[in-house]
Image (spheres, rainbow, N blue to C red):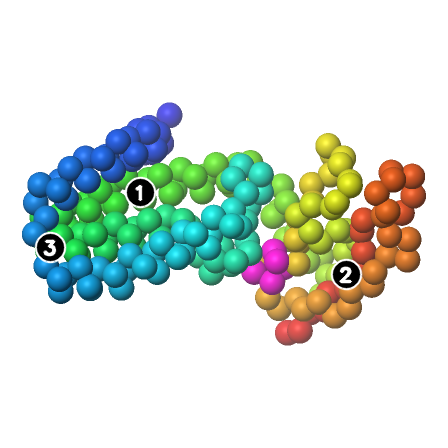
Amino acid sequence: MSERTSWQRVARRIRVPLGFVFAGLFLWLAQPTWKTIALSLLLVVPGVWLRGYAAGYVKKNAEITQTGPYGYTRNPLYLGSMMIAFGFAVASGSWVILVALMAGFLAIYLPTIRSEEAYLREHFAGFDEYMRRLFAASSRFVIVYASNSTSVEGAFSPHVKHRRFTDWVALHEPSWKLAEHIPNAYPYRGDYQEGSFADFYIFQHTE
């Protein structure tokens, strides 16, 4: 195991305890004023909102989330946390706290983020590779027969993974646009006897 990977493992384990250390440092060195508190709200309020917004979309260890705020940044939860943390640093009015927070972010959170991205690439690489090859194989049209939802009510098959693949296309293959959606003439009714939860999706290359 490389040194970098070893530190990533350590960083993941100590980031929560170090949060308590930072809280103690804040209580010890903070010299807030009404002005610094007011300025901190410019970071804290949107940071809290972003974390709450992102939490409604994430499906941890189940799939790579690509909707909501995840369509704009890979780590909205961490981004929200850092906005809150730097907001508190601003409120403290202490350069020591601000510098310590920046050092902690570089030493702890960046390796943690890279470690989690490596995990996602390892465990969810198959779908990305399949989709890239699918769209690379055509120059004009791609037809997909599949469901386009994270779940289908009443349908459970351990070998089937439901997901909104159109979100993946919009994010990774923006030159391909959905030209037509053809609903299944025999939709699934939830009785496992007949019908299908898949529809036809026709994509057209626009460049």
* Residue ID at (92%, 39%): 193
Residue at left offset 81%, top offset 56%: 199
Q: Label for residue 32? A: 3
For this rendering, which residue is in front, 29 or 79?
29
Give x and y (percent) for residue 11: 30, 33
Q: Amino acid at mark 3?
A: Pro
Can you say which quadrant of the picture contains the N terminus? Answer: top left
Residue denoted by label 2 = 201
Kindly identify the amino acid type of the residue bearing the numbered disc 2.
Tyr
Q: Residue at x 47, y 48 (%)?
A: 55
Q: Which residues are magenta?
A: 167-171
Q: Main secondary structure of the magenta part?
A: helix
Residue type beneath disc 1: Tyr
Element assignment for label 3? loop
Contact between marks 2 and 1 (CB within 8 A): the answer is: no
Q: Residues within 10 Å of mark 3 (few under 14, many from 20)?
A: some
